[in-house]
Every structure is written in C-alpha cells, then in structure tokens.
Amino acid sequence: MYQTLRSLALLVLFSIGLPVVAADSKPILIGEISSYSTVPAFTIPYRNGWEMAVDEINASGGLLGRKVEVISRDDGGKPDDATRHAMELLTNQKVDLLAGTFLSNVGLAVSDIALREKVIFVAAEPLTDALVWDKGNRYTFRLRPSTYMQAAMLVEEAAKLPAKRWATVAPNYEYGQSAVASFKELLKAKRPDVEFVAEQWPALGKLEAGSTVQALAAAKGVEASEITVCVSRAHSAELVVDFVS
C-alpha cells in the first residue's frame, strides 16, 4: 500500500506539472471515494491500509518534500453519490487527483468525471474490463486484475473438474454480469462439453440462500443438495460459479 500510494502521488506530480521542489509546502491532495457503508468488510481494511501508508510517507518526509493528504468520502455504493463527491472534491477541496471506488458501476461513473474534468483517477478496486477498454480514457488507471483476468484464472481450475452441468450465482450489477459472461465464454472454449443449466442474479448484498437454492433447483430439476456449496460460497465471496452435477 505504501508503494502504491507513493507511486500514484508521484504520477500526479510529474504528469500534470505540479511543483515538486521541497520549498513548496502545499500538500499533495488525494480525493478518495469508496463504498465504506455498503461493503465494510472489504473497504474498511483497505482504508486502514492507505491511512497507514499516508502516515509512513509523511513520517519519512513526504514526497519530494511535500506531505500527502487524503480527503475521503463514502459513496454508499451509489454512482450518483460518487460523482457528486468527485465534483465536490475537485471544486471545493481542490484535490490533485481522484482515487478509490470499490464497485464497478461506481468506478465507471467516476471515470467519466475524470475524462470530463481532465483529472487523473486511480481506480483501487473496480474489476470491470470496461474501465480500461471500451469505456476507458487516458486519465483512468486501475490497480487490480480485471474481471476477465480473474475469470480466466478460475477457469484454469474449473476446467479440470469432472462437472459438465453448471449454475451461476452473481450480484446483479456490472461486475457480476461481466464475470459470469467471461467465465461462460472461457470455460466453454476449454470444455465444449459443459452446459450452463441455471443462473440467479440477487441484488448486491442481498443474497437469500434458501430461495436461491430453490430457484436453481426448479430451473432444471437439480437436487438442492447439489447446489448448497455453490450458494454458500456465493454468500461469502459475492460471486461464484460452481458445478451442480
């Protein structure tokens, strides 16, 4: 986290011409946005990490003699709130760059702001491929592997399983939709004999295990006992694709 924060701040200094001499006492301002109240299990440890990184960087003298300051906002998992916060950070707080976001649809919304305002946006968590491909722009950078990359890693192991009939359970928004599409495409390419027999799209953070199992079983006459593992993993990991027979 220390090296990541240091690198992105240096990126700003050299890419948009901010003064880098030690005599300039103005701190480097980073406007950070994430879904703290929506997915705290993921975002709170992430916040703890960047807070530690800021303390370490500043304790060692900052970057080229300048302190780093992060002004953080909670988007509540809503793209509209994220864009409102982004504009407030740029207009009122005068931040030098934007960073963060967790959900893919939120990251895409902030990326649009970065393009329109011509400001760097370092996306910490969004996985959607659209962020750097069909909806990408010269101001947006991502730190994590994409949805396609993660699906490809999963397929390498899934293709080794004897299962031929699969069901998917994924959150019904950009990330879940893209992940399932990539997984299906890649697994079928490796294993033409597989069949996807059912799918469920619970709202983000609102997976009801019992009703999901029943819906999957009703779709193709699959025994509920064969799907329990699939649903339990989805409950804890947000997205899962697993065999049902």
Image (cartoon, rainbow, N blue to C red):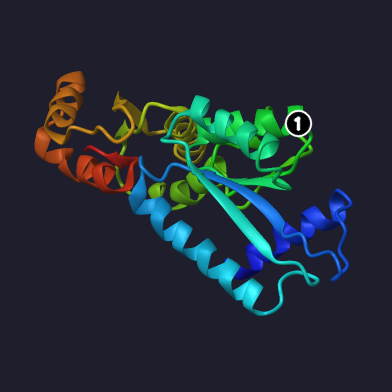
**Quick one: 23 or 68, which is closer to the camera?**
23
Q: Which quadrant is the C terminus positioned in?
A: top left
For residue 176, above or below residue 163: above
Question: Residue 14 at what x, y percent from top left?
Answer: 86, 57
**Quick one: 87 or 37, which is closer to the camera?**
87
Question: Residue 127 at what x, y percent from top left?
Answer: 54, 42
For residue 83, above or below residue 226: above
Q: Which quadrant is the N terminus positioned in?
A: bottom right
Residue bearing mark 1: 117
Q: Residue at x 76, y 39 (%)?
A: 119
Q: Amino acid at mark 1?
A: Glu
Q: Residue at x 80, y 71 (%)?
A: 64
Q: Is residue 75 left or right of residue 109?
A: left
Residue 63 occupies quadrant: bottom right
Within-10-Å neighbours for mark 1: few <14, some 14–19, many 20+: few
Question: Residue 115 at what x, y percent from top left?
Answer: 74, 31
